[in-house]
Amino acid sequence: MKATGYLGAVLGTALVTIVLAPFHTGINSTTVALIFLLVVLLVALFRGSGPALVASVLGMLSFNFFFLPPLYTFSIAHAQNWVALTVFFTTAVAVGQLSARAKRRAEEAEMAKQELERLYSELRDAFERASEAEALRRSEKLKSALLDAVTHDLRTPLASVKASITTLLDEARGSKDAVVLDAESRLDMMEVIDQESDRLNRFIGDLIELARIEAGELQLRPRWGAVDEIISTALTRAEPLTAQHKIEVEIEKDLPLVRVDNRAVSEVVYSLIDNAAKYSRVNTTIRVTASRGDDEMVYVAVEDMGKGVPAELRGRVFDKFFRAMRDGDVTTCAPSGTGMGLAIAKGIVEAHGGRIWIEPRRDGPGTRICFTLPIGDEEQV
Amino acid sequence: MNDTARILVVDDEAQLTRVLRTGLKSRGYDVRTAPDGATALETFDEWQPDLVITDLAMPVMDGLELCRQLRAVSEVPIIVLSAKGEEKTKIEALDLGADDFVTKPFGIDELFARVRAALRRASSSVPAQATTVLEVGVFRADLESRHVTVEGREIHLTPKEFDLLTYFMRNAGKVLTHRTLLKAIWGGNYVDQNEYLRVFVGQLRKKVEPEGAKPRYILTEPWVGYRFEPGNPSL
């Protein structure tokens, strides 16, 4: 690289000399000097300061030898030409050094810029990797928290089943100091097994439904239906749960039909009634209402006269596995739910383009959960 | 075994207390149940049960708080029902003085065995305190001369090993957490020095266990601590 720089300086100067020498009488010496300066400048820009210096010296010698009289000698006749030669040489050296330095600076600046860009992209990659890892870690943490909740809920009924079945087995095997059960106790154990298996099955069913909603695979089969029919289906299904509560139903007359998956929406109403029954004392009232809003929506609400949900927990009741009352009201002996009912309800309502929210009951303590269903567009039929 | 021993079962799972009540009653125990710690304490005050079986996660007052409050007023044996995933809470409960634990889901036999052991321990541990000689199972320790025999064979222990063994003997059958043992033998500053304990238990085992690879007396409760089973002198 270095050698070619010097070679360039020698060749450049030689070329100019060869081209211009035959015309030395026709062109004045200032033009020749300027052309040599141009060579120095070019060499400086492309080859650096060393070659530029060589080009300056060669240029000066060639200028003197071929163009300044007396020609073909290194002696100089006129004092004026001494001045010209000195000015040429000084200018050539200065131009060469300055332009080479400027070039070096530019190169250094360019390198610094590239280095900066490299650092920046490395840093950005590192940040990206770190935030990905953080997101992954968070989602892993969430997953493991959910897994804990799920396994706890799966194991709880299993614990009762296992204890019952081993008691029955113990007796059936008739070992030395085996348990002796009377008919009633035996029935008791079998009932526990029956009920707890149902509970497990319900829990697993809910898990699957929730997974479907989360994966966006909820299969809705919308068809035109009457809100009062949807509500009454839910109420009939919920009868065993609400036997010890008073039920009040208030449905506005002439409600428009809604185009929804009737079974799914009825499931939502059932969940809300189930919740209301669980979290309020016996002999209190559960109210189910439906009315038309100003916004082309039908409003359905279920309210209970329980303790209500504290304001700070209201945002979380629709989170899966969250049970606001798990650590609260023990006056109800009903088995706690799966913590998925409201999460599923939310999924179903939102899949229909409605929304669901929780608020305190308007006249007295208690909870009111309300959801909306858009009134179907006739043209979509 | 006292046939009419009173057992208080505490769990917020109504179905489980229902099963345990039936099972324990059929074995001749007198059983009461409580859905949470607060109710359990009331029942305890009024009824003075011989044994408490309690769940850990409960509303109003959880199993840990119940253990703490019971230990403040009584030495009643406590068996903790824990689920996988509650290891930390289980160890805390044992640190607070619970005697034993059963992991859910459990077979009723396992629970019965723990109940029998806890009741037996409670009825036999009373006279050991005033005397200068501890005799538990095949172990005999003279607290003054510091002589120890196992199945009649004399063994020589360093002072710390002697302290550890006598602590085990005083708490035979109980699950003792690492923390509890370290605190009892080395003091409160050493509660996290599990390796001390490992070394000393290892040395003690070499001296008392007939088969090093299969400990018979000083049993490891994985991740929790140790349980001392003093053996049966008649065997």
Image (cartoon, helix red, strand yellow):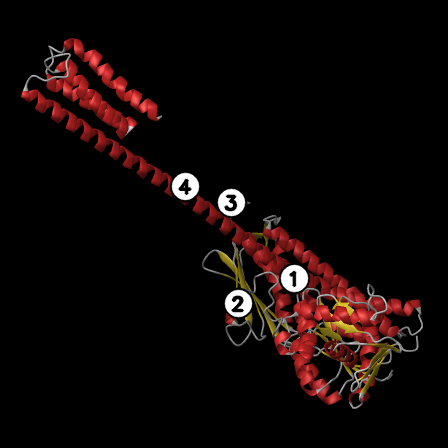
Q: Amino acid at mark 4?
A: Arg
- The chain carrying label 3 is A
Dot 1: element: helix
User: Which residue type does callout 3 highlight?
Assistant: Glu
Q: Which mark is residue A379?
A: 3
Badge 4 density bin: few <14, some 14–19, many ≥20, Cα 10 Å: few
Q: Which residue is mark 4?
A: A118
Tell me, yes or no, if residue A242 can be seen here.
Answer: no
Label 3 and label 1 in one chain: yes
Percent x, y of residue B128: 80, 87
- Dot 3 falls on a residue whose secondary structure is helix
Q: Is residue B123 left or right of residue A176?
A: left
Q: CA distance from mark 3 to mark 1?
A: 47 Å
Sequence-wise, the earlier of marks 4 and 3 is 4
How far apart in space, not on screen, are marks 3 and 2 (Cα)? 37 Å
Q: Quadrant of residue B43?
A: bottom right
Q: Nearer the viewer, residue A183 or B212?
A: B212
Mark 1 lies on residue = A148
The amino acid type of the residue labelled 1 equals: Asp
Q: Check disc 1: other Cα within 10 Å, few if <14, some if 14-19, many if 20+.
A: some
Residue B127 at x, y = what percent?
81, 89
Relative side of A304 to B16, left or right = left
Q: Say if labels 3 and 2 share a chain.
A: yes
Distance between the alpha carbons at the discs numbered 2 and 1: 23 Å
Calculate the distance from the C-alpha at mark 4 to the C-alpha at mark 3. Answer: 58 Å
Q: Residue beneath label 2, please?
A: A314
| In front: label 4 or label 3 | 4
Q: Is residue A133 visible?
A: yes
Q: Earlier in the sequence, mark 2 or mark 4?
A: 4
Using the image, name the chain to which the residue with label 2 belongs. A
Identify the subunit bearing mark 1. Answer: A
